[in-house]
Amino acid sequence: MTPRTVLDGEAAVRAAVGADLGTTAWYTVTEAQFAEFAEATGDPEATYFAVSLSNMFLPQLVEVRGFAMGINYGTGAVVLSGTPKADDRLRARARLADVSDVGSGLQTRITIAVESETAGPLCTIESLSRWLHG
């Protein structure tokens, strides 16, 4: 795992467009997590399980400072290419794909790829965040 990338302020965020934000440590998923996910979402095949982990993985990869607040604004494109199984080891890697101006701050589009140690790529998520000044 690479150390978390710290982007301090608007200039640092803009300068990081195209940058690799690193790779998380491996995370083992359990049968209980799949059962809880299926119950909560009605998705017994855990089709979107790997997508749901992006909110856990992203803060392990990048920290943005110098703004009054950061908001998870949702997702852009999501591409599913596999489904994890119980006891799979998963990790994520990310890249800052784009930065745009919004209101009193910035919006970032970070591409997160979640992969399984045994099955390879599971999904790619375009995570949208807004970083607002006070």
Image (cartoon, grey):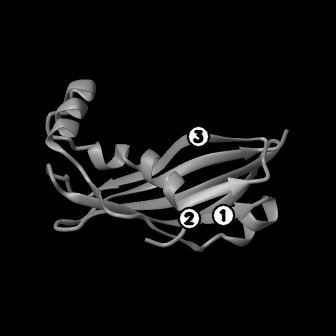
Q: Find residue 34 and report its horizontal and vertical position in percent.
A: 19, 39
Check contact, mark 1 vs mark 2: CB within 8 A.
yes
User: Split into 4 quadrants, where in the image is the C terminus?
Assistant: top right
Q: Amino acid at mark 1?
A: Val
Task: Label 2, secondary structure: give it.
Answer: loop
Question: Which amino acid type corresponds to the residue marked 2 in the rendered image?
Answer: Arg
Give the percent coordinates (x, y) of residue 22: 49, 70
Q: Secondary structure at mark 3?
A: strand
Sequence-first disc among 1 and 3 = 1
Q: Which residue is mark 1?
A: 6
Q: Examine the image and state in which quarter residue 113 appears.
A: bottom left
Q: Which residue is mark 3?
A: 73
Dot 1, how many residues are within 10 Å of its Cα: few (below 14), some (14-19), or many (20+)?
A: some
Q: CA distance from mark 1 to mark 3?
A: 20 Å
For mark 2, what is the residue?
4
Image quarter of residue 97: bottom right
